[in-house]
Image (cartoon, rainbow, N blue to C red):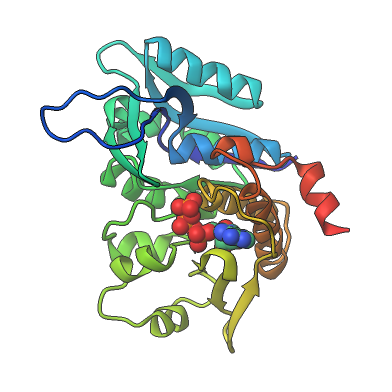
Amino acid sequence: MSKLVVIGSSSMDLVVSAAKRPSAGETIIGDSFKTVPGGKGANQAVAAARLGADVLMIGCVGKDNYGKAILDNFKKNNVRIDYVEPVTHYDTGTAHIILAEGDNSIIVVKGANDLLTPDYIDKAKDVIQAADIVLIQQEIPEETVEHVAELCHSFQVPLLLNPAPAREISQNVIEKAAYLTPNEHEVTILFKGLTKDEALKKYPNKLFITEGKRGVRYFDGEKEVLVPSYKVEAVDTTGAGDTFNAAFAVALSEGKSVKESLQFANRAASLSVTKFGAQGGMPTRDEVERKLQ
Ligand code: ATP
């Protein structure tokens, strides 16, 4: 079993659906409400565990009911939580989502995710050093991503940075990460001043741009390659990117080639869009293998 460490956010999504969005000062009656565990870090950890890796999550939640529900969800999905600390002085991160008129509006409150600092990461140095691969995203402080890039580089542990949500990152992080997986929007922020083709050429076998249902594009050292995704009946694309990143990391950690790993990631991500919800749609290893046949 390959060892994956996921460093990132955990939050509770509070989802309300209504016929319309209230305007300022207005109160309306909604249709439904549900709470769903989310956060890019947690989503990727759960996706990787379903795909059969030994996954250890490094993150922070509040010592409140949402934090407890998130920890229970990790346990249910076999994600190790030795380094997910419930803290008393911050609330669990939340995403407040309004679904109305066919669109969503979201307010994110980072809460305890802001406590995932470089000092906190240092408590888990040993597990990072022992990992086959480390997977990280950007819903946590920027200096933490910088610190993890340094650590992984010094331990010679490959780091997969999913640069989402989009923000500029330092050249140091770009150089020290082994794999970068922006989507088409994120890549324009990451490599300002470079066209997509120029960026791909500059970072062969490191930069992988996900292009939704088209699949994923990279430069293999000689030519640009598009690894196509699979044709599916898409019902909800939420979490496609998280499933893709988790599956790519799992396959790489098992020693699969870059191309094979991208095919595996496309397979897992395309399956995820055929079901509702981010974590709800994440496939098991068996489901992905069946799709292989
Ligand atoms: P999201 O934010 O919706 O989770 P993203 O914007 O981070 O996703 P995308 O490039 O949209 O990332 O999708 C990631 C991967 O998911 C794609 O490279 C592809 O493998 C798969 N995928 C997404 N949408 C589809 C689809 N409609 N059909 C098949 N595969 C899909």
104 w.r.t. 201: above or below: above
* Residue 234 in which image quadrant: bottom right
Q: Report the quarter where the N terminus lies.
A: top right
90 w.r.t. 155: above or below: above
Q: Closer to the camera, 179 or 38?
A: 38
Ligand 1, image quadrant it occupies: bottom right
User: Can see residue 132?
Assistant: yes
Q: Position of residue 69 (x, y in %)?
A: 49, 16
Residue at far bottom of view: 222
Q: Position of residue 200 (x, y in %)?
A: 46, 79
227 w.r.t. 24: above or below: below
Q: Closer to the camera, 52 or 54?
A: 52
Q: Residue at x 55, y 38 (%)?
A: 277
* Residue 223 in which image quadrant: bottom right
Q: Residue at x 69, y 65 (%)?
A: 231
Q: Position of residue 156 (x, y in %)?
A: 53, 54
Q: Is residue 250 left or right of residue 196?
A: right
